[in-house]
Amino acid sequence: MNIAVAIKHVPADDDVRVSKKTGQPVVDLTEGRMNPLGRRALETGLRLSKQDPASEVTAVSLGPEEAEPTVREALAMGADRGVLVADPLLEESTGLATAKALASTVRSLGDIDVVIAGARTTDRFAGHVGPAMAALLGFSIATHARSAGIDGEDLLVEKQRRDGTATRLQVPTPCLVSVGPQSPDPRHATTWGVHAAFAQDALERWSIADLDVSPDELGPGAAATTQENVEPVAEKERETEIFDGEAEDTAESLQRRLNSRGLLR
Amino acid sequence: MAFEFSFAPEHEMFRRTLRGFLDEEIRPRIDDEFYDSEAFPWDLVTPMAEQGLFGVTVPPEYGGAGLGEIGYGILLEELAKVDTGLSTIVGAHTGICLAPIYLFGTEEQKERYLPPLCRGEDIGAFALTEPQAGSDAANIKTRAERDGDEYVLDGTKIYVSNGDVADTLMVSAVTDPALGARGGVTAFIVDSDWDGFEVSSKEDKMGIRRSTTAQIEFDGCRVPEENVLGNVGEGFIVALTALDGGRATLAAGSIGGATEALNRAVDYANAREQFGDPIAHHQDVQFKLAEMSTDITQARYATYHCLEYVEEYYEQIAAGEDVSKAFREKVSRRSAQVKIAASEMAAEVTEKACDIMGARGLAEGYGVEKGLRDSPIAEIYEGTNEIQRMIIGREVAQEGGYAW
Ligand SMILES: Cc1cc2nc3c(=O)[nH]c(=O)nc-3n(C[C@H](O)[C@H](O)[C@H](O)COP(=O)(O)OP(=O)(O)OC[C@H]3O[C@@H](n4cnc5c(N)ncnc54)[C@H](O)[C@@H]3O)c2cc1C
């Protein structure tokens, strides 16, 4: 089975800073990291590949050059191939444009049976890149997966709902699976993996010239939706207080504190 | 740039992934209490070995990760933040057992011993110190008498880190008593399951509790000739070369310990309120924190700079090149200097952290008490700081202050 995993390089800081001038989020990738759900997507892909010794896992990231450490880390974790499609236009692409570029990358890789992606990224929080990619590729799709396994020509995908019930889906390949936070905890790259990730030619560097999309379809101008503005939602301030000591004393302190605030009657 | 000082992307990634591993898998299983057990911590060592932390310096063709001395420094720095006992386990294994086998071993020795050591399936140790030979290591008495194509080892080694669990040991013994350290000491690779090898006792130490320290008796232990490491009579050079690198990476461990103490003090100073204010708002506390952080930064630069020299030094030896005397001395001196600087800095920083934390600095369970017990060891092992000063001082007195 040939597996492609789409992983975005996102800012290390989850707190989105909003530009006063443009009202748009400021993306600072000098301190970046692998998107957490992308990391889980890779773990899911690596586990899937264990079930079929002939499979190959290719990690793909689109973005600016700064995304390189994310592709290297994917290699360090065990991806067989790592492809960085780097172009400033891709950095500014959102939603549909990104999906087009990713779908084109998958087509260029050739012969991909399964695409795995995180259900969303921490920076854009859009959640539609995976589904859009599946639509563009004509792949079947399963979203918010908890686990995936090979079953003949199909994948068996399990998802867990908020209420705790699990759904099992039989998904014919080629398909796209987006993984949610319940998917298996990602592994840590070993020292051997780190070394291998920096071997000469370990990383494949592509440009948009390698894709079958025209530059007009990419970049901020190609977005299907526009982001009007981003503003903080005022949240009630929370307080934490920790009571130290013996259980009985802490219980008493807690009761006194709740009483004094009129929260116990 | 003429003077570049930054980590390679490979090393940056190693530090990041290592931190992730240690914070998620190891730190939660270590508390700050006194580690009462005398048992070697296999529960922590096994996942560390699977992660590839037991062979970082050695190139992949022998099963290692090829991350070199800088990678090894990063490893000990990060490990020591979590537990100095663990960094000692890895240090005794890698720096003074694995390294000399890689640097001086024959192709057969390297192929046989390095892969299982790198995987951490075999644990390594280094046995030089004896009851009458501590600082005066040249005075070792363990005898290796030739008998046909074997050597018969008799004698006692003490303070052998990992000694009770080691599979493979680098042992220094006297092959020619008349020559002593000048041509009469030979290094041997010894398997602990051979007859005549016995662990006779274990130390009960104040600090680095997770690192076990054993006494070993050799009683007619037969070592085949092919297990001589390096040339017969050159065992002292083998040991000293290993210690040259070892000291610089010990310094990296001290930096990790000091950083941990600083972090504990910062957290505490921000959380602890007295007279209605976090104590971190007081200038005296801030000055202490500033000094701690300044001292750590200085030691860190000097140590990684020295590790670059060690890296080059070891590359030359591994490639079978002749290392110039001047370069060898420079590396020895640098590593002795950073060992002194970093170990004493760590002890001072830990003491300042203790001051900042008041009673909780001395109480079990807050981390700094453990740091106070753990930090002094780096001033003693791999040659006491006094001995390092003695060697540096003798050279400086003769040659004057030296340039780069
Ligand atoms: C936890 C631990 C782990 C160790 N692990 C190992 C190991 O794995 N393998 C191994 O071979 N050894 C190991 N050692 C031994 C260590 O290297 C020695 O303890 C060290 O070299 C000092 O020797 P000593 O303890 O016999 O002290 P001594 O040599 O007796 O020294 C006592 C004091 O006298 C000072 N002194 C001695 N001579 C002079 C001099 N000429 N001038 C000025 N001052 C002097 C010393 O600096 C020291 O302060 C370990 C020790 C410890 C504590």
Image (cartoon, rainbow, N blue to C red):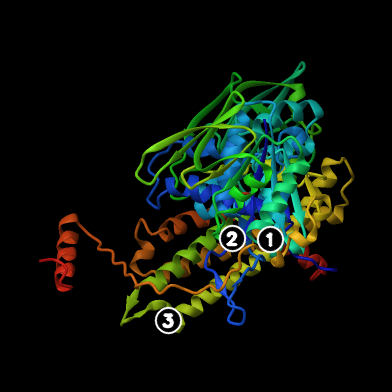
Query: Which residue is labeled 2 in the image?
Result: B255
**The numbered mark 2 sits on a residue in which chain?**
B
Does B196 sit left or right of B268 as displayed?
right
- Pick the quarter of the image with the C terminus of chain B: bottom right
Mark sitting earlier along the chain (2/1): 2
Query: Which residue is labeled 1 in the image?
Result: B303
Q: Residues within 10 Å of mark 3 (few under 14, many from 20)?
A: few
Q: Amino acid at mark 3?
A: His
Does B148 sit left or right of B262 as displayed?
right
Count of numbered labels shown in the rendering: 3
Q: Are marks 2 and 3 on the same chain?
A: yes
Q: Are marks 3 and 1 on the same chain?
A: yes
Q: Residue B14: give x, y in percent of width and height.
A: 65, 50
Residue A233 figure quarter? bottom left
Q: CA distance from mark 2 to mark 3?
A: 26 Å
Q: Is residue B368 above or below residue B191?
A: below
Q: Residue B332: give x, y in percent of width and height.
A: 75, 55
For label 2, the SS is: helix
Q: CA distance from mark 2 to mark 1?
A: 9 Å
Q: Nearer the viewer, residue B386 or B119?
A: B119
Q: Which mark is residue B281?
A: 3
Q: Residues within 10 Å of mark 1 (few under 14, many from 20)?
A: many
- Dots 2 and 1: beta carbons under 8 Å? yes
Does B136 sit left or right of B360 as displayed?
right
**The furthest residue to the top:** B148
Asked whether mark 1 and ligand 1 are closer than 8 Å, the reply comes as no
* Front tag of 3 and 1: 3
Q: Amino acid at mark 2?
A: Ile
The answer to whether residue B246 is seen in the rendering is no
